[in-house]
Image (tube, rainbow, N blue to C red):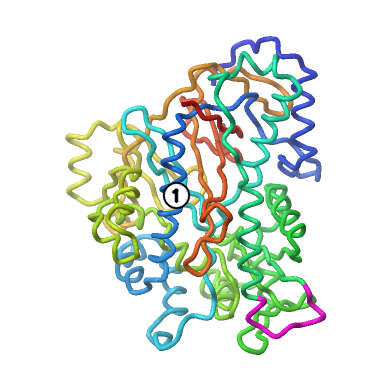
Amino acid sequence: MNHQTAPALSQSVIDAASEWAIMHGVAFRQADNSARHCPFSIAPITMARATFQHLRQVTPLITKLISNLSEDHDFLQTSLAGVAKADPFFARLLSLHQQVHGQAQQHRQPARKPLLLMRTDFMDDRQHGAKVIEFNGIAAGMAPFGQRASELHAFLHSQWSQAQQPWLEHPQATPAPNQGLTQLAYGIAQAARQIKAAFPVDPSQPNPTFLMVVQADEDNVYDQHLLEIELQQQGLRTVRRTFEQLSTQLTSGDDQRLLLAGVGAIDVVYLRAGYQYVDYCSPQLNEAICCHTLSQTRQFIEQHHVAVNATFSQQLATSKTMQMLLTMMPAAEYARWGLTQAQAQQVKSVLAEMKPVTPDSIHWFQTEANKQQWVLKNQGEGGGHCIFGDDISHKLAQLAPAEYGAWALMQRLYPHEREQPTLAVRDGKPTQIDDLVSEIGLFSAYFDGEPVTELDGYAGYLIRSKPASENEGGIHSGQGILDSLTLSN
């Protein structure tokens, strides 16, 4: 990061923006229960309108593809078996998936209804154009923060346009509308009402009920609470539980109704936990098989007539390995999951090259590849799972052949650096950054195979920016800052 002297943007403007952020829930909870605002940029990035519109059109197609693929249970089992041998957590997921959808289940539809809430992350590469970094199908959060970042920049523009002006990349560009929070909540509410309507009217429970499965003592709670508040405004009751709490609180009602002790019937289960082993770990249970009880709780949920995000199927279908398989297969094969040739080509246009880790690809990488053009990824979700440049050679040399299936090589993306320096505000203090690059995540929502937003499945965006010199761009775990988007012609 460039720690140059920040130019004279008055501290009163910085303070007003920081306080606006905390007042509107754009914050992380601290250990002492106070709040710290998320780091943010003082002015939005600019993208060519045609580029954004292409992503806006292709993202629901990706969601349709993943939605249909995730219900193709035989394909998931056969195509991901290799990863399961290399990654213990993946093996557990695939085993749980098999328990829910195995041969004994083939004669009947699974009880749960899939609610696919996805964030597809892109970078606009200088040479190759906008490409997918990854699919996020479980705990795909921060739509509320995405919408709030757009609102924060609008607030600054309306109150201090002269102060913001020097930091604008293209002053004539227009803000890209962002309804990430409201549209995601709309999609969830649609699913909840459909589930509730399938059961007899219960006067004691007039409103659909939404259950968020959370991690204990996590700090990223305000983003979650913003979604809950929006759902409450759309007529839903919301409750929060950890897997550990649910392990003793869930029961079955009539007609595969999912019941929660002290609450009643549940219509939607939304997992903000479950993408790592630790989410299922309960030391006091002292289990022979790690994480058995809490992962069985998730399986129990899927055996009921309830809308679920993410299902085991969705988590497997949005894995790095599935992204690699979709990248490598001919577009014509997407017809199996309901895409026309034209739609398949659109999806293909945003997929960056990927290669499996094999003896041949390792030899190629060590002898021929431009090491700066690749990134090595494992199956992990969140930050900290990518290896770059010369470090890839060291890692590949360390891997045992049994571990190869858990890793993939992916074309490294080099996004445009912002033409104008910007100010990053972190902990109420501004820092000038001269080489900011951005990642754009587009949200989408499908329920039971159909789009459920007012925008035909699309549901808004999240912009995270970081210095080009930093590899870890997470808002939460890296050097990332919240940002928003303007469009130029």
> What segment carries the magenta color?
196-206
Residue 416 location (% of width, % of height):
42, 26
Q: Is residue 67 above or below residue 47?
A: below
Q: Is residue 163 above or below residue 253?
A: above
The local crowd at label 1, few if under 14, some if 14 to 19, many if 20 or more residues have their Cα within 10 Å, is many
Amino acid type at circle 1 is: Thr
User: Is residue 92 rendered to the left or right of residue 75?
Assistant: right
User: Is residue 238 rendered to the left or right of residue 7?
Assistant: right
Locate residue 249: give its quadrant: bottom right
Q: Nearer the viewer, residue 326 or 1?
A: 326
Q: Nearer the viewer, residue 386 or 49?
A: 49
SS class, disc 1: helix
Residue 229 location (% of width, % of height):
76, 54
Residue 359 location (% of width, % of height):
19, 50
What secondary structure is the magenta-colored segment mainly? loop
User: Is residue 218 rendered to the left or right of residue 361?
Assistant: right
Q: Nearer the viewer, residue 312 or 455?
A: 455
User: Is residue 458 rendered to the left or right of residue 228?
Assistant: left
Locate residue 191: give its quadrant: bottom right
Locate residue 340: give its quadrant: bottom left
Query: Magenta segment: does it hold 458?
Result: no
- Identified at 47% across, 79% down, the residue is 100
